[in-house]
Image (cartoon, rainbow, N blue to C red):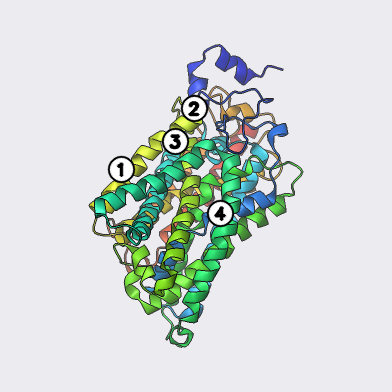
Amino acid sequence: MTTKLENNIDSGNAGNVCANGKDTISNANDPSNQPWRIESNGIRQVPEEACSGSAWDLFWVWFAASIGILGLVLGAIVIGFGLNFWQSLIAVAGGTVVSYGLVGILSLAGWKGRVPMMTISRAIFGIYGNFIPTLVSWVSLVGWETIVVITGTLAMMALLGMAMHAGTITLGLVSLVVVAGLSIAFSILGQATLVVVQKWGSYLLGIMTVAILAEILTKTSFHTIIDQRGGSWLDGVLPAFSIIVAGTGLSWANAAGDYSRYTSSSTRGRNIFWGVLTGGSIPTIVLIMTGVLLGAKDPHIATATNPVAAIQHVLPSWMYVPYLITAVGGLIVEADLSLYSSGLNLLNMFIPLKRYKSIFIDACIMLGGTIYVVFFSSSFFQPFESFILLLGVGLAAWGGIFVAGQLRFGYALERTLPSGDNRDSLFDPRHSTLLVKKGIGWPGGIAWIISTAIGLLFTTSPFFSGPLAKGIFANSSLEILISFAIGGIVFYVLSLFTSNSHDG
């Protein structure tokens, strides 16, 4: 049967083509998403017969995404707040579970909706109103993939430097080609390939990571940090908790549905939630807590220009090669997800390209940022921390609004949209729902602007400080939690008025 959407695109309706991207319609009978073949699907709704994924697939996707060596850097940042071991564990475990719990909840929306995360977001913000939140999401993903590829390139440079005598520029260029090349290739191939790569990456890199962490832990004086006097719960534990929330699962919240949308409808929702939560949390907590121990031993790791080399120096020389191989591999399987999802975000911003072509735009930006930092920049920590905090505010606001929408209308658990027959509203700007009129969801848009603005007022970062970031808010990073809570509350209240108005 020919759908309304297919008729619109076949007839050359430019608005709907832009809303979906050129590759949004394909023959459902074609193998549009097979491992090692370029995925032809963009942001269209995945047909039921193409959904064969499992909760275990999601476990391995998020497990591999969390193996990256940046977890050790986050741990070094946490210990910089003056916490003892138990306080660090509370902040790290609590922040990670809350953060990846959010990813698990949002993954349910992708599973039910069968479209990418920021496409489902149109149900609240509208096709046009969703542009700004999607832009923030895209910038966040491009920024993260750039940070990850930078770190991977630095690790690869150190690895190649042990095997060949060459100048910094040569080592940097070769390393960049390897790390960025593999990340780009996997993301171009698409979701099915990524599932395979992430699964085997989890197996191989997980084993090597455990061996490296075991070596680090055997050389660690636990009593030094355990016996250390605790820091302030308000000025120490709370900001550390917020940093972990922003730097772990929250940074993936806007991509959660991108990978669950291919999961079989026969899978239980709770299995999806727990698969995402455990897959992301287990390696993250282990790595960050190891980083806490390393940071207590060497505080310079958090502020090092090359954090990979700083961590390498605390290891015995015989472990340099395994460590660097693990670091490079872990960062590649993290960057490929960011690239894949950022390409989908571009399609949601009306870029009329096929999915795999959109990735080249992100790749060019990523390569430019990597070249600048690797060859010209003198600091790693300050841009990293500032980036996490500033973009975390907008993402937290979006996450709060989306979760409030789930609570208000239940479309992530029972149905995709407030009304089960309104799925065309994700693609047709002329289609209105309770929340969306003429392509703009005013309750969601107003709530996002208010919550993001308020969050920025309380934000403290190396490059920007809001006028209200004083006293208790100066170092607490509460803006993340504030934005999330205010976004959800404001949207929930506005949606009540919208509903009452509609009922009247």
Question: Is the residue 356 above or below the residue 456 in the image?
Answer: above
Residue 262, given in percent of the width and then of the height, sits at 65, 40
Looking at the rendering, in which quadrant would you find the C terminus? top right
Question: On the rendered structure, is 172 left or right of 440?
Answer: left
Nearer the camera: disc 1 or disc 4: 4
N-terminal label among 4 and 2: 4
Residue 50, given in percent of the width and then of the height, sits at 69, 34
Q: Which mark is residue 359?
A: 3
Residue carrying label 4: 201
Nearer the camera: disc 4 or disc 2: 4
Dot 3 alpha-carbon crowd within 10 angstroms: few under 14, some 14 to 19, many 20 or more: many
Looking at the rendering, in which quadrant would you find the N terminus? top right
Q: Which mark is residue 102?
A: none
Count of numbered marks: 4
Q: Element at badge 3?
A: helix
Q: Are marks 4 and 2 in contact (CB under 8 Å)?
A: no
- Separation of marks 3 and 1 at Cα, in angstroms: 14 Å
Residue carrying label 2: 354
N-terminal label among 1 and 2: 2
Amino acid residing under circle 3: Ile
Q: Element at badge 2?
A: loop
- Separation of marks 2 and 3 at Cα, in angstroms: 9 Å
- Separation of marks 4 and 3 at Cα, in angstroms: 22 Å
